[in-house]
Amino acid sequence: MSNPMTTLLTNIAELVTNDPEATDLLGLIENAAVVVEGSQVAWIGPAAEAPDADVRVDLGGRTVLPGFVDSHSHLVFAGHRAEEFTARMAGQKYAAGGIRTTVAATRAATDEQLSANVAHLMKEMRAQGTTTVEIKSGYGLTVHDEARSLAVARQFTEETTYLGAHVVPAGSDPGEYVDLVTGPMLEAAAPHARWIDAFCEEGAFDADQARTILTAGQAAGLRPRLHANQLTYGPGVRLAAELGLTAVDHCTHLSPADVDALRDSGTIATLLPGVEFSTRQPYPDARALLDAGVSVALASDCNPGSCFTSSVPFCIALAVREMGMTPAEAVYAATATGAAALDRHDIGRLIPGKRADLIVLDAPTHAHLAYRPGVPLVTQTWIAGRPSL
Ligand code: NIG
Ligand code: FE
């Protein structure tokens, strides 16, 4: 059998490797090259030392970095809530109940309409450098609509999350609904899902309900994660640390004890600054988390209610401008730590043996992602060794 084709990407002004052996966070290499063999990275190093390859691509002094791993999104939905956003910008407060508007639209949509919407958003994401995306259900909230939402999500990604516990649907009794989420709905959802999630928040699910839901999901073979401390201070982050979750998402309202608990449990805090932007909330304190030794991931939370952006570069710019992260910390959070937040060891770094998921940035350094906000700098997105943009 012949070896897979090799491609040399060369004349890279700055290569972000996220190499854990490097002395700097991003494992930067200047004047670099990458050799891709089949779907994987085969070699990285200075361009002057690069081996020969079947194909040579001159990147003209651009930056190459690992593809963004967007570990939190809600792409399976129909309709939009632009009016709610407009009202919010005029002073109205965001509340969890708005989710029910999208639930009604999603239930009324066909599978084809839902798939087309996901495909459209995924295309936007790829154009902005996202190479792996996690997609949640949570706008169906019936056995049938949660299962089909996850089946739609599965057409696009392995990283699917069952979020039947997004909000209690209109007209349902909360206790009976938790029984449904942990019973027949879980059974229908589990074959299509890798993860289970719950929205632990005032107006959604309390800590006891969240614990019950995540425990049931685990018993069904799913990995637990949690939306916590988004709109108000609450017990969700403590619960996440106690359960030793891989990641807990939002973390907007934290006490010093919560920060310590996250550090001690090793749970990743996934911050979603597009939400604070779109709901006019204070941003989470990324600096306090990082300084305490907590791992921080950044993700889009793309959804029609609290944050309708598909752009990880936008989130990086917000994290740097508003949350005290350095450009290097923000890039690392959206790549290596995003991968860790999905328990993925094959992506998030450009070192030999990892999947060749990479972005070519029309800029001389990664810092331009924050320095040039709103500018479409991503010129190529490669997934598993192939250009896919
Ligand atoms: O992550 N927090 C809960 N769910 C989404 C918002 C969903 C919506 O408003 O439609 C979030 O912010
Ligand atoms: Fe979310």
Image: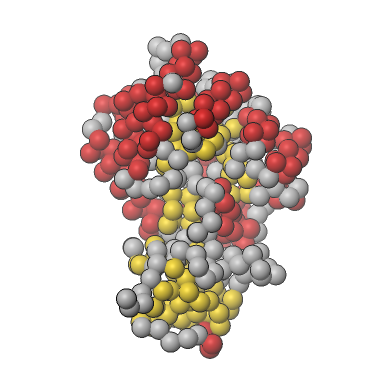
Relative depth, front residue between 112 and 35: 35
Q: Residue at x 39, y 21 (%)?
A: 184
State the quadrant of the N terminus: bottom left
Q: Is residue 18 left or right of residue 359?
A: right
Quarter-of-image position of residue 254: top right
Q: Residue 383: tell me if it is visible.
A: yes
Q: Residue at x 56, y 23 (%)?
A: 212
Structure colour scheme: secondary structure
Q: Is residue 25 left or right of residue 36?
A: right
| Relative vertical location of residue 223 with respect to residue 360 in this rendering, above or below | above
| Relative vertical location of residue 159 with respect to residue 101 in this rendering, above or below | below
Q: How many marks?
A: 0
Q: Is residue 149 left or right of residue 230?
A: left
State the quadrant of the C terminus: bottom left
Relative depth, front residue between 348 and 229: 348
Q: Give residue 321's position: percent from left, percent from top.
A: 61, 53
Q: Is residue 59 left or right of residue 251?
A: left
Q: Give residue 269's position: percent from left, percent from top.
A: 62, 43
Q: Residue 338: tell me if it is visible.
A: no
Q: Give residue 273's position: percent from left, percent from top.
A: 56, 44
Q: Give residue 332's position: percent from left, percent from top.
A: 59, 59
Q: Residue at x 67, y 52 (%)?
A: 324
The outermost residue toward the front is 1
Quarter-of-image position of residue 229: top right
Q: Residue at x 47, y 61 (%)?
A: 67
| Relative vertical location of residue 313 with respect to residue 37 in this rendering, above or below | above
